[in-house]
């Protein structure tokens, strides 16, 4: 071979080297959306389209403003929450809370159209909604109920208010002590309370509405009318705590606007029905420095910004541990609490043994880390063993009746001084609501991660 | 294909990549990059030694000690590539990284020798470097 030939060969090789050295470049996550970059990925068992996933996940932007209707039950039993105002008298908790609420409804920036109703009973025992002005509503709350009004049977009042709100496409805020006062001629209503509540709220379920129940207790002055009339038909109270309830019924996002932006400070006792999220943003965090995984686990895709498919292989004495980041900011407030999630988040495992080690809310550190800032909670999982070579781990939050319901419920509300903050048959009322939504969706949300045994 | 080949080649001695969460970065980027660069740089140095320095130019670098010098130069490059690859791809540096660099160095020595044996025959001045074998004359 001649020298010239070698010379040209060498230059070809050097040229080739230059070209090849650029071949397997690390693509940053941002570049991944470019179609050219995707050709480089190794074939994956579960083809994932990060771009499409992402767009599906963007939370449906909650409406900024809502239409609101406020219903206040007016009956002799409610009078004690709203004693006549006087300069030397502190307003009751009920009065200050309700005052703030209607003020926010009237003048707050999140409510478009508003209307106020006093819910009472006519002479025939039928519920009536008295449409009133803001001033009248305010006057009733601070000045008390003057006339003598009988209590409305609970289911009837709910039904009529709901119907009215649905017909006008508004969110209803129903304020009542929820003490069941059935027509004295129909005592059987005591027994069928749960099914009656269910029937009365059927419309909400049919229309796809969600319900938030907020419970609080307020000082009570005056005649208290218990549901159980023995031994006393009524008692005179002087500041004992009696529960009252704010029910918010409407479209899921609209209820959220009301609870977070109109009511603002929610009591600790919250219950949510019919809330479900088709998707919440989540990702397995496998390259985070804050949540370093343990054991043999890695994302199936090298470049995916959101990792929903992982490869893992737990070994004897080396279980796999990794963290999933979730954005639960759209969930009802009480469901976002780490303690609630800790006791209620569950795993559905398919082909894998896994358990939840810890649930942690976002802190200053994670909020300051760009790739973690979009997640509100971090769930640490442990996988000691695989039982199949592929499958899924599914993190889900089942629909749940919160514990406080039982604590706030009683079968005998006759003596509130001895047993404060109890409502007659609250569990039954809530059971009726729960039954309404029972079959609609089992979970508030579900986050599923596919896995393959690592090779 | 290339990715699997080089991953297999390195994991044969190294075992699975560590830390495990960077497995993909090793298998899809670092191993193939390092392997290809090892191959090409070694080949280039062998060609330069036999055909540039000892054929086209008569530099007098035909002795075995010169050949060893090039082998060592190649080995140093082979040790550096994995470390730069790991750092350049934002992968956590681990003791695995240095074991990997060491294995790559060993491969570079073997490869340099093999290329030398295969290509030395065409050289004018260095056809017997580092050894006369396998040519019979």
Image: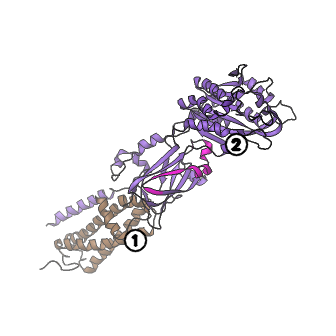
Chain colours: A purple, B brown
Quadrant where the N terminus of chain A lies?
bottom left
Picture coordinates of residue A138, whole percent (x, y): 75, 27
Q: Quadrant of residue A146?
A: top right
> Which residues are the magenta region?
A329-353
Task: Answer above or below: position of A259 versus B95.
Answer: above
Instruction: Between label 2 and label 1, give the one nearer the viewer.
Output: 2
Residue located beneath label 2 in the image: A408
Residue located beneath label 1 in the image: B99
* Label at residue A80: none
Answer with left or right where residue A313 lies relative to residue A439.
left
Picture coordinates of residue B2, whole percent (x, y): 29, 59
Picture coordinates of residue A426, whole percent (x, y): 67, 38
Chain at numbered mark 2: A
Task: Tell me what residue is drawn at x 60 percent, y 27 percent.
Answer: A170
Task: Tell me what residue is drawn at x 63 percent, y 38 percent.
Answer: A430
The furthest residue to the top = A123
Task: Tell me what residue is drawn at x 16 percent, y 71 percent.
Answer: B122
Q: Residues within 10 Å of mark 2 (few under 14, many from 20)?
A: many
């Amino acid at each position: 071979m001649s020298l010239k030939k070698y010379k040209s060969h060498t230059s070809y090789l050097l040229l080739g080297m230059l070209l090849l050295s650029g071949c397997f470049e690390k693509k940053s996550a941002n570049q991944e959306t470019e179609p050219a970059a995707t050709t480089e990925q190794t074939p994956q068992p579960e083809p994932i389209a990060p771009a499409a996933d992402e767009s599906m996940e963007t939370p449906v932007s909650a409406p900024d403003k809502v239409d609101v209707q406020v219903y206040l039950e007016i009956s002799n039993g409610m009078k004690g929450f709203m004693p006549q105002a006087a300069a030397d008298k502190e307003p009751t908790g009920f009065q200050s809370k309700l005052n703030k609420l209607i003020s926010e409804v009237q003048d707050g920036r999140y409510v478009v159209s508003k209307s106020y109703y006093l819910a009472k009973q006519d002479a025939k025992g039928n519920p009536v909604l008295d449409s009133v002005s803001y001033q009248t509503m305010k006057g009733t709350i601070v000045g008390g109920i003057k006339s003598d009004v009988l209590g409305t049977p609970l289911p009837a009042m709910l039904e009529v208010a709901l119907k009215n709100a649905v017909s006008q496409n508004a969110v209803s805020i129903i304020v009542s002590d929820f003490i069941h006062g059935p027509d004295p001629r129909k005592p059987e209503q005591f027994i069928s309370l749960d099914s009656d509540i269910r029937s009365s709220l059927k419309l909400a379920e049919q229309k796809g509405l969600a319900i938030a129940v907020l419970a609080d207790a307020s000082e009570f002055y005056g005649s208290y009318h218990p549901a159980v009339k023995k031994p006393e038909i009524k008692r005179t109270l002087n500041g004992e705590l009696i529960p009252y309830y704010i029910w918010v019924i409407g479209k899921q996002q609209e209820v959220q606007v009301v609870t977070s932006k109109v009511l603002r400070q929610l009591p600790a006792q919250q219950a949510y029905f019919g809330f479900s999220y088709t998707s919440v943003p989540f990702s397995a965090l496998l390259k985070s420095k804050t949540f370093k995984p343990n054991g043999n686990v890695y994302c199936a895709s090298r470049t995916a910004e959101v990792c929903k498919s992982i490869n893992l292989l737990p070994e004897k004495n080396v279980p796999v541990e990794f963290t999933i980041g979730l954005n639960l900011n759209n969930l009802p407030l009480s469901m976002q609490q780490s303690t609630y999630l800790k006791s209620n988040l569950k795993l559905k495992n398919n082909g894998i043994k896994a358990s939840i080690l810890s649930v942690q809310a976002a802190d200053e550190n994670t909020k300051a880390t760009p790739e973690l800032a979009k997640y509100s909670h971090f769930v640490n999982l442990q996988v000691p063993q695989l039982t199949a070579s592929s499958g899924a781990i599914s993190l889900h939050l089942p629909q749940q009746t919160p514990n406080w319901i039982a604590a706030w419920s009683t079968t005998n509300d006759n003596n509130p001084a001895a047993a404060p903050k109890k409502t007659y048959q609250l569990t039954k009322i809530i059971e009726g609501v729960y039954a309404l939504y029972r079959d609609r969706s089992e979970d508030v949300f579900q986050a599923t991660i596919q896995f393959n045994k690592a090779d | 294909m290339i990715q699997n080949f080089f991953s297999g080649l390195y994991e044969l001695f190294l075992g699975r990549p560590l830390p495990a969460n960077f497995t993909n970065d090793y298998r899809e980027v670092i191993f193939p990059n390092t392997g290809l660069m090892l191959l090409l740089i070694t080949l280039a140095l062998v060609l330069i030694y036999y055909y540039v320095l000892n054929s086209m130019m008569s530099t007098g670098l035909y002795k075995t000690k010169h050949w060893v010098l090039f082998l060592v130069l190649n080995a140093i490059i082979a040790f550096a590539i994995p470390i730069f690859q790991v750092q350049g791809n934002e992968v956590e540096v681990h003791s695995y990284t240095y074991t990997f660099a060491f294995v790559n160095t060993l491969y570079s020595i073997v490869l340099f020798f093999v290329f030398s044996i295969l290509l030395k025959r065409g050289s004018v001045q260095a056809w017997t470097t580092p050894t006369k074998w396998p040519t019979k004359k």
